[in-house]
Amino acid sequence: MKTAVRHMLWTIVAMLFAGSAAAQDFKVTLLGTGSPNPLFERFGMSTLVEAGSEKLVFDVGRGSTIRLWQAHVPLGSVTATFISHFHSDHTVGIPDLWLTGWIQRPFGMRKGPLVIYGPKGMTAMMADLQRAYAADIAIRSVDEKDPLEGVAVEAHDYDEGVIYAKNGVKVTAITVDHGDVIKPAFGWRVDYGGRSVVLSGDTRYSPHLIEAAKGATLLIHEVSAAAPDLLAQSEIATAIFAHHTSPQQAGQVFGQTGPKLAVYSHLVLIGDATHAPPSLDELVRQTRETYAGPLVVGSDLMQFDVRQDEVRVTDPPKTR
Ligand SMILES: [Zn+2]
Ligand SMILES: [Zn+2]
């Protein structure tokens, strides 16, 4: 009898453990939620999606490597990297991820190539970076004996459609609208285990993205807002704002796609010396003009556990 009870208890424990393990198999971490502005609290645009055995990094803005290591993810363990478009706030972290990830210390440890997918021009950019950093590669391979396989590059130029399918994870590139001279520009849909995460990339209000994001479990969308008087006075503020999605428009996108959770990342809050940028409360207030559903304003290192029926949010650690 005792044995039977013990067996039953162990079965329950095993079931609970299996349940929690399964629930954690699709996780998103915001590595950077900012814009080109060099803010210490919001690093450059970058998002980590962990799905099964895959660790995928989408865009590699400033400080992406620091946030990865803060999240206890060795840079060398990233299985593939994706770039949405060639604005520098989405790419400046590439050499850091590539070269620091090669260093054979716990934060790095890459043994094979950096695998990177980007729009047409990605392969050329990586060839240029290999030339730019040839001295570092030559020095470290001799001096620190870092293996050359770990600094190799496997680059791909992609177009719209399914661009990656491995270990049950599928990544689909979605053409978005980031303005007439910034083409191509992409967002992505990541599907895994009957759930999906959509990342908008940089875009204006995009019906095409809405179509591709329908039924997504988690929708992470960019947003921009400007101090009201500034748009009337500043050409540059108007130009920046015109490349992005307003809170009211983002609310429409959320309403039309109906995710379990909508999240803002890549916050482009426009101000200047005499106009304070809109606050986060103001961002939410403007979104609420068009959308009443679940909404979170993202911050660096915020995490999302993507489950079948809900998305659980973990706030970032207080000290960082
Ligand atoms: Zn951009
Ligand atoms: Zn951007």
Image (cartoon, helix red, strand yellow):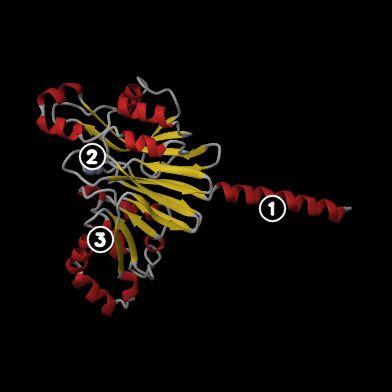
Nearer to us: label 2 or label 1: 2
In percent of the image, x 57 and y 46: which residue is there?
23
| Res. 184 in view | yes
Residue 178: give its label: 2
The location of residue 125, given as percent across then percent down, is 21, 60
Task: Decide which of 87, 164 is in the foreground and name it.
Answer: 164
Q: Which residue is mark 3?
A: 95
- Measure the C-alpha gap from mark 3 to mark 2: 25 Å
- Is residue 5 or residue 191 the one in the foreground? 191
For badge 3, the amino acid type reads: Pro
SS at mark 2? loop
Q: Which comes before the other along the chain, label 3 or label 2?
A: 3
Q: Amino acid at mark 1?
A: Ala
The residues tagged by marks 2 and 1 sit, at their Cα atoms, a distance apart of: 48 Å
Residue 179, how many percent across, how many down?
20, 38
**Quick one: label 3 or label 1, which is nearer the N terminus?**
1
Q: Is residue 314 left or right of residue 124?
A: right
Instruction: Give the residue drawn at x 37%, y 64%.
Output: 108
- Give x and y (percent) for residue 114: 33, 64
Q: Disc 2 or 1, which lies upstream in sequence?
A: 1
> For residue 163, what is the image quadrant?
bottom left
Front-lying residue, 58 or 96: 58
Does the Cβ of the disc 3 residue fall within 8 Å of ligand 2? no
Q: How busy is the neighbourhood of tag 2: few (under 14 within 10 Å), some, or many (20 plus)?
A: many
Question: Which of the 4 image quarters holds residue 145?
Answer: bottom left
84 or 49, which lies in front? Answer: 84
- Which amino acid lies under the numbered mark 2 shown in the image of this protein? His
Is disc 2's CB within 8 Å of ligand 1?
A: yes
Q: Could you tell me residue 227's position as x and y percent?
A: 20, 25
Q: Nearer the viewer, mark 3 or mark 2?
A: 2
